[in-house]
Image (cartoon, rainbow, N blue to C red):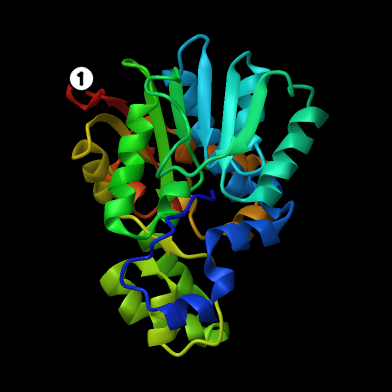
Amino acid sequence: MTDNHHDREGQTADSDHRYLEIHPERYYDDLHEDEWERLNSGAKARLEFENTVDYLESHLPDKGHILDAGGAAGRYAIWLAERGYNVTLTDISNAQLDLARKKVAEHGVAEQVTVKYGDIRDLPFDERRFDAVCCLGGPLSHVIDPAERQRAVRELSRVGTVDAPVFVSVMGFIAVVERMMQVAPEFEQGVRQLPDLLDSQTYSADLLAATDCEGPTFVECHFFRADELRQLLSKNGFSVVAVAGLEGVASNFEQPLEDASDEALTYIREIVREPSFREDPTVADISNHILAVAYATEDSQP
């Protein structure tokens, strides 16, 4: 979840310097093992992982070399390696890369997983290198400049083979607005940011400066609408075959899900993971994380 652009268009030098903790490299370096733990931190987080894995199992080739771009500490890379794939994991956080090396060794897949520095805007690989490309958990959301996001999407296409599926998940806009309203009594700073966030859909140093906030509470991030993700991929050489809400109607319900009985969670998981429901445009749009599955068109191939 940790790729970023270096030239933040529209941001002032003052705001950029004032809020250093907002930069993805710094933010994910400081997270340590929290990013590794995130996908197993509760029922809602496990829904994100389970729904993502459903689509990987449906669209991945039977074998091959998979790129895990912005793969952080390696949750998906290890899952892929345990199923026989060779994996290259890239990230811009050196701390997450170090942790990924540790985790792949602990899980006995170090020979199948290569871990190296890489930015999704300028991937350090030749054309048509990978049999599938993953960009999961939100790396594309951390590219807050629109032109840089287009560049990143084209890079995901460039490094995949002709028939390679590409899996991209981003952070959803509706869910984050809803979340800010839920915590309004304890988070007045976030409520002050809502009008500007509504206009830009982007949490940035400029937004913090404009709303006179003391410091960041999250990493710089562009929050997506579901159709926005579909259009971004479609306009940059992809044929999109699915857009799904990974947490769907369970988004922002962390505590109720933790309090639910095992039997209730069984029914909730069945609903949230039902393919036609999670791909309903409204359900996808309200989700904390939105996943797109796409294939590069012939015209987009180098």
x and y, in percent, of residue 93 in the image: 62, 51
x and y, in percent, of residue 178 in the image: 42, 68
Q: Quadrant of the C terminus?
A: top left
As drawn, is 279 to the left or to the right of 217? left
Q: What residue is disc 1 on?
A: 298
From what the image shows, is residue 193 above or below residue 278?
A: below
Residue drawn at x 38%, y 33% as measured from the top left: 156
Report how many numbered discs are placed on residues in the image. Answer: 1
x and y, in percent, of residue 118 in the image: 53, 41
* In front of the other: 248 or 242: 242
Amino acid type of the residue that numbered disc 1 sits on in the rendered structure? Glu
Residue drawn at x 33%, y 59% as measured from the top left: 145
From what the image shows, is residue 32 above or below residue 271?
A: below
Which secondary structure, mark 1?
helix
* In front of the other: 129 or 169: 129
* Quadrant housing residue 258: bottom right
Residue drawn at x 54%, y 48% as measured from the top left: 1
